[in-house]
Image (cartoon, helix red, strand yellow):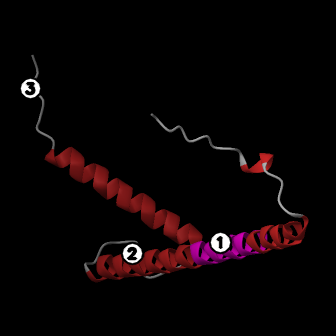
Amino acid sequence: MEHVLHLIPVAAVPAPQHCWGHAQCLRQKQGQNLLTVEQRIRDEQRMMDEKIVLELDQKVVDQQSTLEKAGVSGFYITTNPQELTLQMNLLELIRKLQQKETQPEKAFS
């Protein structure tokens, strides 16, 4: 003889009257805990973002210093957004010139 287990949805089983207050209290506490966890996650994400930005800023300063010491024109330590944009454009130009220089010459047919 085979036994079959029938599951009854929780909503279909009425809880005793004294449990309603406790269940409501648990739902409220769960909601508060969820809000607390969500806020903690937002705070940790913000702190991680700030840490990453600081690390990137330090990399920029290191790069500026290295290029300045190497005598590359236009490079010096700065946080001025316009000067940073100019330096980024200079780096892009240097990169493109280097790529062009290393590409093999195409033969004319």
Q: Are marks 1 and 2 in contact (CB under 8 Å)?
A: no
| Horizontal arrangement in the rendering, residue 3 relative to residue 25 (left or right) | left
Between marks 3 and 1 in the image, the one whose residue lies nearer the viewer: 1
Residue 53, position as x, y percentages in the image: 51, 75
Q: Which residue is mark 2?
A: 75
Residue 96, position as x, y percentages in the image: 30, 49
Q: Which residue is mark 3?
A: 107
Residue 69, position as x, y percentages in the image: 28, 83
Of pointers 2 and 3, the one earlier in the residue sequence = 2
Q: Tell me what residue is drawn at x 35 percent, y 76 percent.
A: 63
In terms of depth relative to the viewer, which is nearer, 99 or 50? Answer: 50
| Horizontal arrangement in the rendering, residue 4 relative to residue 99 (left or right) | right
Q: Are marks 3 and 1 in contact (CB under 8 Å)?
A: no
Query: In what quadrant of the picture does the C terminus appear?
Result: top left
**Residue 71 position by quadrant:** bottom left
What segment is highlighted magenta in the picture?
Answer: 31-46
- Secondary structure under tag 2 reads loop
- Which amino acid type is marked by label 2? Phe
Which numbered dot is residue 42?
1
- Please say if 5 is above or below 35: above
Q: Tell me what residue is drawn at x 89 percent, y 70 percent.
A: 18
- 37 drawn magenta: yes
- Secondary structure under tag 1 reads helix
Cα–Cα span, label 1 and label 2: 37 Å
- Which amino acid type is marked by label 3? Ala
Cα–Cα span, label 2 and label 3: 37 Å
Cα–Cα span, label 3 and label 1: 58 Å
- Which amino acid type is marked by label 1? Arg
Residue 105, position as x, y percentages in the image: 11, 35
